[in-house]
């Protein structure tokens, strides 16, 4: 049975008990203390941050939320250089979306500019998109009429009820043979509601063939930090797209590996949290992070992907199989665009193509490894490596890392793979 929730599959590391719907159409109350606590924590929280002499939390509801440091997440470092922006971030178990705006004013106290950000926090990242236009409108109102919180208060009173319970919107677990049929109905709507149309396409075109380098690093659950000056909104989308590269739908695969957690925007206040993470992808506008080499495995600056870890440096080189995969991906995209040219809008199908391409590649690798592991001679040969779509020589190090991380310790590697 396909299990669904209101959260993106790659973000669903917390177990939230589902609720049952009674015959009258209402929602039953929680049946246990654990379920009650889970549902209680699914409230919406609104906050308003301002930047004057420094970032500060100007207003929030509810008052009992722990929002320490959220003012530095809702207004990214360097935001004074842009007029508008939006920021996705994490605060504990919550995800946040904030809309920022900067308006020039004739005020020496405000140093010639009024900067504010209106944000919302929720345990469900995939629901935040619904509030984007409201937040954009509210931050403009706050710039024009500071201190008028009644629209925010009214909206909070309307939305503070429980968010839609688990059981709607998003697929979190698939039978292996159900993925292809389900993606158009479940996975793709998730992409549409969490991203502007064409986001995955833009992500892949931005990195070009080096998307294959990011794909390998994501599949290996490395700590990936993306740097960019403001605006940071589009970079937050790259964080999510990067997570999509590591999607696997074969049951049981990846259960024992570290969660590939999206942190979205991070700043120096998040250093202590990142120190304890084994695997993540995040973005920042603070260049000082590049010097914190113990916090990440891979640093992405514009299209430049680099690492200071000697064991990972060979993975930054494209193998022959990488170039071939990218060529096939480009060909498939061109064929799709040509076949749908008369329809006018083919963005959704193009997004499906990219998502499925990496999903099928990942499934192909682990399906082959499972077959090798179950064979009388559990040896990874050149033929089995080619069956995975990898280069027996150029991808040897990637394969060794993969076997170690995913626990395929019982597999032997043919000596023919020992020379690169």
Image (tube, grey):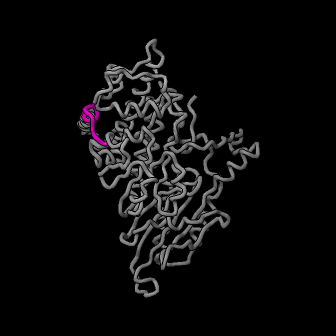
Residue 73 visible in rendering: no
- Residue 188 vs 386, above or below: the answer is below
Q: Of residues 98 and 371, which is closer to you in this image? A: 371
| Residue farthest to the right, as pictured | 32
Q: Of residues 316 and 416, which is closer to you in this image? A: 416
Magenta-colored segment: predominant secondary structure: helix
**Residue 187 in picture, x, y percent from top left:** 46, 38
- Residue 133 vs 52, above or below: the answer is above
**Residue 243 in picture, x, y percent from top left:** 44, 44
Q: Quadrant of residue 220?
A: top left
Which quadrant of the rendered structure holds the C terminus?
top left
Q: Of residues 229 and 342, which is closer to you in this image? A: 229
- Residue 57 vs 222, above or below: the answer is below
| Residue farthest to the bottom, as pictured | 108
Residue 318 among magenta residues: yes
Callout count: 0
Which quadrant of the rendered structure holds the N terminus?
top right
Q: Residue at x 68, y 48 (%)?
A: 38
Residue 298 visible in rendering: yes
**Residue 335 in picture, x, y percent from top left:** 24, 34
Stretch in magenta: 316-323
**Residue 305 in picture, x, y percent from top left:** 32, 49
């Amino acid at each position: 049975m396909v299990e669904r929730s209101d959260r993106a599959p790659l973000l669903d590391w917390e177990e939230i008990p589902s609720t049952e719907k009674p015959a009258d159409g209402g929602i039953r109350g929680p049946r246990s203390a654990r379920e009650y606590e889970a549902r209680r924590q699914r409230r919406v929280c609104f906050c308003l941050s301002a930047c004057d002499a420094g970032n500060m939390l100007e207003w929030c509801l509810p008052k009992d939320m722990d929002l320490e440091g959220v003012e530095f997440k809702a207004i990214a470092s360097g935001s004074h250089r842009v007029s508008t922006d939006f920021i996705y971030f994490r605060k504990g178990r919550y995800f946040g979306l904030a809309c920022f705006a900067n308006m020039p004013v004739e005020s020496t106290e405000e140093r010639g500019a009024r900067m504010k950000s209106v944000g919302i926090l929720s345990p469900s990242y995939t629901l935040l998109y619904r509030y984007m236009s409201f937040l954009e409108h509210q931050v403009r109102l706050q710039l024009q009429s500071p201190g008028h919180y009644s629209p925010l208060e009214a909206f909070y009173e309307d939305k503070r009820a429980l968010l839609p319970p688990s059981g709607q919107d998003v697929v979190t677990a698939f039978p292996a043979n159900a993925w292809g049929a389900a993606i158009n109905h479940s996975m793709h709507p998730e992409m549409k509601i969490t991203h502007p149309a064409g986001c995955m396409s833009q992500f892949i075109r931005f990195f070009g063939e080096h998307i294959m380098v990011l794909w390998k690093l994501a599949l290996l659950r490395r700590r990936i930090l993306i740097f960019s000056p403001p605006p940071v909104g589009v970079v937050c989308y790259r964080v999510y797209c990067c997570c999509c590269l590591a999607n696997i739908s074969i049951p049981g695969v990846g259960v024992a590996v570290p969660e590939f957690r999206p942190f979205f925007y991070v700043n120096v206040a998040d250093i202590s949290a990142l120190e304890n993470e084994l695997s993540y992808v995040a973005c920042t506008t603070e260049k000082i992070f590049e010097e914190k080499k113990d916090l990440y495995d891979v640093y992405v600056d514009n299209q430049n992907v680099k690492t200071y870890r000697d064991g990972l440096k060979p993975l930054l080189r494209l193998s022959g199989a990488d170039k071939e995969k990218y060529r096939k991906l480009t060909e498939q995209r061109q064929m799709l665009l040509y076949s749908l040219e008369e329809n006018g809008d083919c963005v959704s199908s193009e997004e499906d193509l990219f998502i499925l391409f990496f999903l099928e590649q990942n499934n192909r690798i682990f399906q082959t490894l499972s077959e090798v592991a179950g064979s009388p001679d559990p040896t990874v040969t050149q033929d089995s490596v080619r069956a995975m779509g990898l280069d027996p020589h150029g991808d040897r190090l990637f394969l060794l890392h993969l076997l170690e991380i995913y626990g395929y310790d019982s597999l032997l590697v043919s000596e023919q793979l020992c020379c690169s």
